Amino acid sequence: MQALPSRSAETGPARASWTLFQLPQDQTCSLWKEIWAFQARPDDLVIASYPKAGTTWTQEIVDLIQNDGDIEKSQRSPIQLRQPFLEWTRATYFGKSPVYKLTLKTHLPVQLLPPSFWEKNCKMIYVARNAKDNMVSYYHFQRMNKRLPDPGSWDEYFEIFLAGKVLWGSWYEHVKSWWRKKDSHPILYLFYEDMLKDPKREIRKVMEFLGKNLKEEVLDKIVYHTSFDVMKNNPMTNYIDDKHLNHKLSPFMRKGVMGDWKNQFTEAQNKKFNEDYEKHMADTSLTFCMEP
């Protein structure tokens, strides 16, 4: 695991050399012993994904289902406080929480998730997005996020992403490792593209996975309140007040569509990506839809 310096670092490119993965220096590597020693409880829920794959969307869906579609409860605080980010929050914070059932967000690959989550057999929801759109969304997110390394030009980022040298590692290994793990652990594996095409069906899957039974009108309400336009205008989900995000460069919630990669990839990049994708995905049954 290797850490990259934050763009705002003043001490130069100090790096923590571990092996295999790249994680944020200040927010994650400095707390790694504490993160790894985190003690999960059996009723804790994990929402996992590669960065910019639909995490916030899934979080809001889960929160509304957990609260039986009560919109007022979902407005109690920003999403990052309702469902803390495991990598950027001290483990002691969780231990002091009066809430027994915690819902946590993470971008960690399977092998770096603290072992107590597996030992306690915690339920997990993983959401995956096709690599082309995920790459484009992640690029623009890195442009506007002061906590993350400057991604450089699109052409530079394209090569770095394909090589897996971005924070939280290779997209290929991330989605495949979680896909494999679902065969031996209670993991609901969702696809961003399916959520776009039929949100009510996918929300129902989440509801059933969480052991809830909500009325149709409640599901319809959740579909509406977790739609892109509503969430983009919801200060509890769009991170508009986060001082680390420069919304003038790119909004946190940018487009929320499938196929935006066509506005970013050159023909040569698309050809190179397709060849790389075919090679890396040959050993898995996992498939993605990249065309709207």
Image: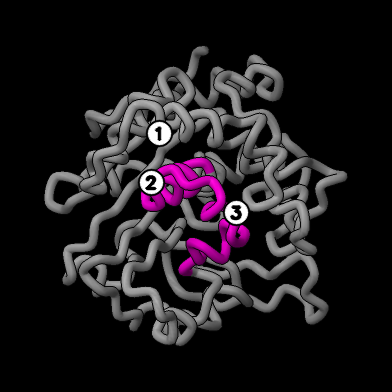
**Residue nearest the viewer, comparing 200 with 131:** 200
Q: What stretch is highlighted in magenta?
A: 57-86
Magenta stretch encompasses residue 61: yes
Kindly indicate the quadrant of the structure image that contains residue 160: top right
* Residue identified by numbered label 2: 68
* Residue identified by numbered label 3: 75
Mark 1 or 3, nearer chain start:
3
Residue lying at 68% horizontally and 38% vertically, measured from the top left: 232
Amino acid type, callout 3: Gln
Name the dominant secondary structure of the magenta segment: helix
Amino acid type, callout 1: Val
Side of 244 where 97 appears, left or right: left
Give percent across and percent down for residue 120: 18, 70
Asked whether the viewer can see residue 130, the reply is: no
Give percent across and percent down for residue 135: 58, 36
* Residue identified by numbered label 1: 218
Residue lying at 76% horizontally and 52% vertically, measured from the top left: 240
Magenta stretch encompasses residue 31: no
